[in-house]
């Protein structure tokens, strides 16, 4: 089980960014049956295969917001993996996730940075957003924010 200290989310800023929900994988959403197929669309690897993103979908429940993102990386302190689930908020996922559209960059000072195109639903329409992830393999910490597209 992941220690709570490994799960962090950035705070809301004046630039329109807001925290995404970063949770432990002990949830019904984080289940292998929810993996989006084909695998080429549902799984991406980074950092020489050490970091994996999995696009999960709970089958349209809730109808507006059933897409979630699982992040797997080596646990820096214990054998095994750190597993975090990223959702739009504590109650629901994203309207859509474009995992193949993910862009990656690496900075030794901060770790792996990923930008994942996502969409939120406001009750009437979907709004494109960008999910920014910062993954530090040395500490096992995953930070996530979502922000408006330019």
Image (tube, rainbow, N blue to C red):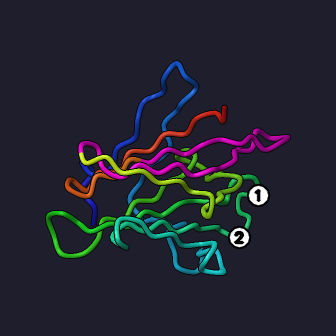
Image x and y of residue 36, in percent: 64, 74
Image x and y of residue 93, in percent: 61, 53
At x 64%, y 72%, the residue is 41
At x 21%, y 53%, the residue is 139
Front residue of this view, candidates 121 and 50: 50
Drawn side of residue 76 relative to residue 63, left or right? left
Of the 4 image quadrants, the one containing the N terminus is bottom left
Front residue of this view, candidates 143 and 41: 41
User: Which residues lie in the magenta part?
Assistant: 109-133
Residue 63 — which label? 1
Q: Main secondary structure of the magenta part?
A: strand
Based on the picture, tell me whether residue 127 belongs to the magenta stretch: yes
Q: Residues within 10 Å of mark 1 (few under 14, many from 20)?
A: few
Q: Residues within 10 Å of mark 2 (few under 14, many from 20)?
A: some
Front residue of this view, candidates 50 and 48: 48
The residue at the far left in this view is 77
Name the residue tied to disc 2. Answer: 59
At x 56%, y 56%, the residue is 102
Of the 4 image quadrants, the one containing the C terminus is top right
The residue at the far right in this view is 124
Q: How many marks?
A: 2
Image x and y of residue 13, in percent: 48, 23
- Give the structural element (helix, strand or loop) at label 1: loop
Based on the picture, tell me whether residue 112 belongs to the magenta stretch: yes
């Amino acid at each position: 089980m992941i220690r709570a200290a490994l799960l962090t989310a950035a705070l809301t800023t004046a630039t329109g960014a807001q925290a995404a929900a970063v949770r432990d994988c002990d949830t019904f959403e984080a289940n292998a049956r929810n993996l989006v197929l084909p695998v080429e669309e549902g799984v991406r690897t980074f950092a020489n295969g050490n970091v994996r993103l999995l696009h999960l979908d709970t089958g349209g429940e809730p109808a507006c917001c059933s897409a979630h993102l699982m992040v797997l990386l080596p646990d820096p302190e214990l054998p095994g993996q750190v597993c975090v689930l990223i959702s739009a908020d504590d109650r629901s996922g994203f309207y859509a996730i474009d995992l193949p559209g993910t862009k990656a960059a690496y900075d030794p000072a901060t770790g792996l940075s990923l930008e994942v195109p996502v969409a939120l639903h406001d009750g009437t329409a979907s709004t494109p957003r960008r999910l920014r992830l910062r993954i530090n393999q040395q500490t096992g910490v995953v930070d996530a924010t979502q922000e408006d597209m330019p």
